[in-house]
Image (cartoon, helix red, strand yellow):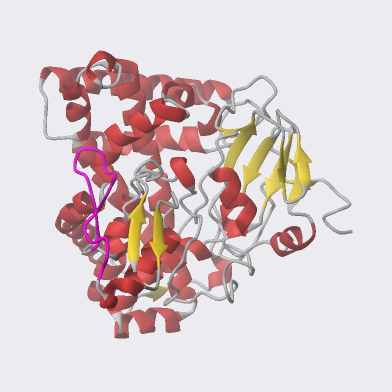
Amino acid sequence: MKVIVDEAKCCGAGQCVLIAPEVFDQRDEDGIVVLLEPEPAEDRHSAVREAAAVCPGAAIQLAEGS
Amino acid sequence: MTVNDQVLSYPIPNDAALDPPAEWAELRARCPVAHVTLPSGDGATLLTRYEDVKQVLADPRFTRQLNAPDAARLSADGGGVFSSEMATIIPDSGEEHQHWRRLVGKWFTAKRMNAMRPAMIRIAEDLIDDMVKRGAPGDLRASLGFPLPVYVICDMLGVPAADRDRFSYWSDTLLNLTRYGKDEIEAAQGEFFQYMSDLVARKRAEPGDDLLSELIAVGGPEDGGLSDIQILVTGMALLVAGHETTANMIGKMVSMLLADRSRWERLLADPSLIRTTVEESLRFDANSGFGLPRYLNAETEVSGTVLPRGTTVVCSMAAANRDETAFENAAEMDLTRSPNPHLAFGSGAHSCLGQALARTELQVVLEVLLRRLPTLELAVPVEELERVEGLAVGGLREVPVRW
């Protein structure tokens, strides 16, 4: 799984950080998403999928598979 | 008569405190772009489908310029939070809005909210102790739901504890669409404006460790900061937004969980469900209030209907959150639902700035209540719970509980 974030679409809601804190963070200066793990380990995939599904800015894209 | 043959009054009257009006399902199925009459008598277009509401809230052509000359007035006096002058001072769209959002948004990150958790837990515990001391039955709305979010947002903004109670009245006059007359609203707004103006002046003279002081410290627009009036209005907007919304949601969430006590027992047995339960409570809330109005500045199409420029659209997030095409078993409250992409906080660039704060407050309240008052139950039959009428934000008049 590859994770791509779009800073321009990010509205700083923080849902991704609350759901998958190992993969996502927010910049201290403006709350915009920081991607910590672009290729997260398998045990985090379900949390990452949930974070992408509920992102209010649709700022998280996932490329699944190989 | 079906919804196609009549013009509905909006908000749709509903006697049941926790259940949705029957009209929602019919509107979603047969009339997703419906003509409605607002309390002012003006016409607007109501959207109830998940996909439509989500699309419109994220579409910049649907603006927040509810003060446009041909926009529908929500209340007879044209007052209320959506059309107030306040709404025009904070940039509405584009880069300026994004700049404002990011300046303020840094205060509402998930990390900051987690850091505030211990303080929130203490506030919740103290308020629950006081309620227990007064004895059962107690009103959870007045004892816990209302004070907690006010204390938290006042602390963030650096508002002295002694001044907290005045905000209830001021924000009520802004958020209530029908209860107050124009003179009363204007007088309250004048007092609120003067209070915030004095507060900003005090913060400028003696900065503290709070949001307003830091916004001032950034400097004016030439330094990448906000103008004085923008700082002042931002403070007012955050106090209002951080107050009544979560306050009402606490009472509604606990009522929904106690209305079918097997839900409460399930949480007692497995507190790890608190996070998904909070999200499901937000989705399931059938009494979330007015919804979000938008003013259309270019002709567009929604669900096959052409909407002319100048249309005022009302997005019912609560109706959209019950859409069977978006949520399996949408009429069931499922404490494990995941993912739960509900629209309670809106969607897109304008989605609720304080949503991490609201989520954390709701999680903390539930966590502390389950721990301290596991025997909690409603002290009246659920049919006797009454809605607060006329608010832009929906709530319950009282939440009588015993333990």
Give the camera-side residue of A48 and B131: A48
The residue positioned 74% from the left and 49% from the top of the image is B33
Quadrant housing the C terminus of chain A: bottom left
Q: From this viewpoint, is residue B225 visible?
A: yes
Residue A32 falls within the magenta-colored stretch: yes
Q: Is residue B250 left or right of residue B118?
A: right
Give the camera-side residue of B118 and A30: A30
Image position of A5 with respect to B85: above or below:
below
The residue positioned 44% from the left and 74% from the top of the image is B258
Q: In terms of secondary structure, what is the magenta stretch mainly? A: loop
Magenta region: which residues? A23-40
Quadrant housing the N terminus of chain A: bottom left
x and y percentages locating residue B51 in the rendered image: 62, 56
Name which quarter of the figure residue B217 lies in.
top left
Image position of B206 with respect to B50: above or below:
above
x and y percentages locating residue B396 in the rendered image: 50, 56
x and y percentages locating residue B47 in the rendered image: 67, 49
Name which quarter of the figure residue B322 lies in.
bottom right
